[in-house]
């Protein structure tokens, strides 16, 4: 069976998108390789520990789907240049780098797996603009 190397699949992950949210952890995938779909998902791993499928979700165009609902009739679709958000419920990450693994079964290909290592991003405050020296003054007639 044909396979796609993990180093190519790793390019699906959008670097810097791993983060903690109020629901759990989240990261983003963007397919730059070519359109495709999976008929089954493999549980996500976090630092080598498998996460139950019922805690793993993906969202495309606002439609949330649990990993365990993916089937040949309801595939996990990775359209070209489209963003997919992946959420793992009820988990949180510490500030150090973590390795996240995921995989899926694609018709005509072998079971595809990849992982990535990244540090969770933190919310940053918007930049502050120092006040204009002497204040702003308009033209006075």
Image: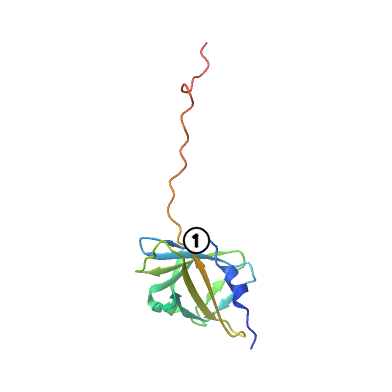
Front position in the image: 64 or 8: 8
Tag 1, which secondary structure? Answer: loop
Residue at 61% over, 84% down: 109
Compared across the picture, whether 78 is left or right of 42 comes to right
| Residue 69 to residue 59: above or below | below
Furthest residue in direction top, as rendered: 141
Count of numbered tags: 1
Compared across the picture, whether 5 is left or right of 73 comes to right
Residue at 41% over, 70% down: 88
Image quadrant in which the N terminus is located: bottom right
Q: Position of residue 78 (x, y in %)?
A: 57, 71
* Mark 1 Cα shell of 10 Å, populated few (<14), some (14-19), many (≥20): some
Could you say which quadrant of the image residue 26 lies in? bottom left
Q: Position of residue 50 (x, y in %)?
A: 41, 79
Q: Position of residue 126 (x, y in %)?
A: 45, 44
Could you say which quadrant of the image residue 33 lies in? bottom right
Front position in the image: 83 or 114: 114
Furthest residue in direction bottom, as rendered: 1
Residue at 44% over, 77% down: 48
Residue at 46% over, 65% down: 97
Q: Position of residue 80 (x, y in %)?
A: 62, 67
Indicate the colouring scheme. rainbow
Residue highlighted by disc 1: 17
């Amino acid at each position: 069976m044909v396979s796609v190397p993990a180093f190519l699949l790793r390019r699906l992950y959008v670097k810097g998108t791993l983060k903690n949210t109020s629901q759990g952890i989240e990261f983003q995938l963007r397919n730059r390789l070519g359109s495709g779909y999976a008929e089954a998902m493999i549980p996500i791993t976090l630092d080598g520990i498998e996460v139950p499928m019922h805690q793993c979700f993906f969202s495309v165009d606002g439609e949330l789907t649990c990993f365990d609902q993916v089937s040949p009739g309801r595939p996990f679709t990775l359209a070209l240049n489209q963003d997919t958000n992946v959420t793992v419920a009820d988990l949180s990450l510490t500030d150090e780098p973590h390795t996240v693994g995921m995989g899926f079964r694609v018709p005509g290909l072998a079971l595809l797996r990849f992982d990535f290592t990244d540090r969770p991003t933190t919310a940053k405050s918007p930049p502050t603009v120092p006040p204009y020296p002497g204040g702003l003054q308009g033209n006075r007639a």
